[in-house]
Image (cartoon, grey):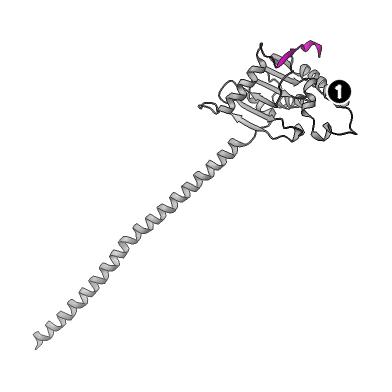
Amino acid sequence: KMMENDHVISSVANAKNQYVLTALKTVANKMEHRPSRLLQSMTSMNDLDIKARENRRTSLSLQLKTKTPLPHELLLRHDTAAFVGLTHHSLASVFANALSEEPRRKWKRIYILYASDSLVDNFKPLSEVNCDTCQDGKGETDGFRHMRQTSQSELSNLLTDRVEDLRFYEITHHSGFFGAWFGWRSPGGYIHVSPSIWGVDVKECPSQNYIWELEQQPSHDYNAYKRGIENLLSGATPYAIPLDISSF
């Protein structure tokens, strides 16, 4: 009888042990896999965080890259610059701003090109061209001429001893846009242009910027404007004539 009871107890014990063992295995399996899933989740979150930081850095880099520099900042970066404009009435102040930051700054080549009197009418707003009560245009042309002469005098006095090759030109033909070229002949060059629009005030016309990125080839548009300024500065150009600085 005693042996029978022992057998029963032993069977019950084995069953309990088997149950506990199965339960432990289940727990062990869960414990074994949870860290793996947790690690995967943490890794995924970490990857997302890294990507987010990279995207923020890329976005910031693009913002810095596409930020339009101020004209005097471009003058401080480049030794060569060319300017095509109607009167350049504010250009002397741009150079003055650059010199206020770097008083000893000098440039290798500065070319300044003005639209001639014969081209001024092409840039008048339509409201002034067709205005019966407005002046006949002579007064405004005289105003442009006065601003141009003032600009030439100011720039000549300011830059004569600071530029190795300082030249002034008058554009006599085909001036469809204004612009500024900074170091345009080499990588890192920067070109800013503002096309003229029929009957629209030049101050309201849109503008575009073109950059010759380092270690890259310049774009087709960049090359077109690069050729344009070289054509204007060419000794054989039919579009512009050099001006005598001593006459300013």
- Left or right: where 147 falls relative to 171: right
The question of residue 183 being in magenta is answered with no
Crowding near the residue tagged with mark 1, few <14, some 14–19, many ≥20 C-alpha atoms within 10 Å: few
Secondary structure at badge 1 equals helix
The question of residue 238 being in magenta is answered with yes
Snapshot quadrant of residue 234: top right
Where the C terminus falls, by quadrant?
Answer: top right
Name which residue lies at 85% across and 22% down: 146
Residue with the mark numbered 1 = 142
Residue 108 seen in this snapshot: no
Name which residue lies at 15% across and 80% down: 11
- Asked if residue 63 is positioned above or below residue 117 in the image, the reply reads below
Of 111 and 64, which appears nearest the observer? 111
Task: From the top left corner, tell me how far across and down residue 113 is, in percent.
Answer: 72, 20
Where the N terminus falls, by quadrant?
Answer: bottom left
Name which residue lies at 63% across and 27% down: 191
Task: From the top left corner, tell me how far across and down residue 202 is, in percent.
Answer: 75, 31
Name which residue lies at 69% across and 14% down: 238
Of 114 and 69, which appears nearest the observer? 114
Residue range of the region highlighted in magenta in the rendering: 236-248
Snapshot quadrant of residue 156: top right
Task: From the top left corner, tell me how far across and down residue 227 is, in percent.
Answer: 61, 20
